[in-house]
Amino acid sequence: MVTETVLELQGLSKTFGATRALANVDFDVRAGEVHGLVGRNGSGKSTLIKVLSGYHVPDPGGRLIIGGEVVPLPVTGRAAAEHGLVFVHQDLGLVGAYSVLENIRLNSWASSGLQPIHWKTERASVAEELARFGLFADPATPIDSLSQVDRAIVAIVRAMHHLGVTGDGTGDSTGKVLVLDEPTAYLPTDSVTRLFDAVRAVAATGAGVVFVSHRTDEVLNITDRITVLRDGELVETVVTDDTNEDALVALILGRALDSFYPDPIHTEPGERVLTVEGLTGGLVKNLDLEVDRGEIIGLTGLMGAGHDEVPYYIFGAKDARAGHITVNGQELPIAKSTPTDAIAAGVALLPADRLNLSGSAAASVEDNVALPVLKKYFSRGRLQLAAVRSQVGGLMTSFDVRPAMPNLEFSALSGGNQQKALLAKWLQMEPSLLLLHEPTQGVDVGSKADIFVRITEAAEAGTAVVIASAEHEDLANLCTRVLVFDNGRVVGELAANELTEERILALCYRGGRDSNAPAQMERKFRWRPHRVGYDN
């Protein structure tokens, strides 16, 4: 049986100056299929999506065919919407000052003319759609007050509404195309499962789905076919059932990758770097924690467990209600400490939201990377720009940030290259304590491996590292110890042979009820000189 093609791109190219972002790419999506689009950061995935949405003007010569009809290029945003293209972009495209209800329904209201809005009915309908993804927020809640996870869910619910998919997952989306650009980047595991159910339901209503992700396991789980881009060129389109993760990674990188993870660290116990006593604030309750030089400590739990708040309290980015934090013997005031105080004490923080909390999108790469050390480049009251550029250029080369152009606007870098640049920004300071929140979020497999190597090298050089993350496999392979949180408290500590992805997941879901958890745990979690790879 021949399946209808709902979207087809022929000979698509896009050039930025001397850079060829896309080179004669052919791509098609069939009705009822989920089609994966993968590749390293900078491979051309986002450029292709932005051409489809009307954001980028492609080079002459390409063709776009939707539902058998040739659509003139460049396509406009309105034309894309009229032809049934619905997008969930990486930046989500939500209006922060508007409510959840307004963000989801605004386009529908605008297209319906001067019709009265039945607010009670709309609120109930939106609440039902949100609940399907486990979000029970009041539809009147402003977007700005939601977490990044909840904002992502709102963006996905809005897309489903535009496709005509109702709160119970039914509807008719024949001939339409849903484009999901890194939809799971901010979603916890349980929400990813619900998203996948919704994506399959959309495909079952007749739509084609384009699923863009760096997570190869997710792509293999949800798709029917996968197209691989590398350096702007089409590498291959494969049937998902005919491939596996190793083969897919090899296509993405152009080579086989033996392992994402460096060898386990082998450092002797060092002096105490961080002491946390009775830390209480937000979701966190009475946390005690001790970290020594050379340790890599993981903090994890399900959404709302509180583990992801800890780095921000230590860094002074959030004020705690009670407790004591000491770094290198210096106590940081629990309620009045600032990031400036933390940096002066040798602490660095790389937040998950790199564009809003860690970097400045509109500033240059040079400005972003040099900011923490800018003072040392002043001489007689003048900034030595040549020295700054030389330093940043060297770091970009060392950390394999591409393109290695210090004067490039930071937002022009792909996600993986942004993250490597920000890691270089902090590691050049040789911090005593490095705090990381989801350090590989939205990062391709090659950049992910590079980042893990840098984290391990920093620990081997004596830096104490604390990673708050929901990536259990990463924590199991990188960390000396992992602390699992539930309801704001540590309910388990895993190390050595116990430190596996399966054990972490079991503690996350069962909390203190896990019968295999250690029966007794010290209140203070101290260095234990053993882990996977050690001789015990």
Image (spheres, rainbow, N blue to C red):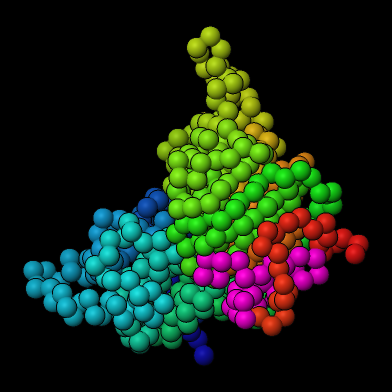
Q: Is residue 425 left or right of residue 361?
A: right
Question: Relative to residue 171, is residue 321 depicted above or below?
Answer: above
Residue depicted at x 58% and y 46%:
325
Whether residue 384 appears in this view of the structure is yes
Q: Nearer the viewer, residue 128 or 288?
A: 288
Residue 501 among magenta residues: yes
Question: Relative to residue 99, is residue 166 depicted above or below?
Answer: below
* Quarter of the rendering containing residue 443: bottom right
Whether residue 229 appears in this view of the structure is no
Q: Residue furthest top?
A: 380
Q: Residue furthest bottom?
A: 1
Q: Which residues are magenta?
A: 486-513
Q: Is residue 374 left or right of residue 257?
A: left
Q: Is residue 153 left or right of residue 40?
A: left
Residue 492 among magenta residues: yes
Residue depicted at x 52% and y 17%:
383
* Quarter of the rendering containing residue 215: bottom right
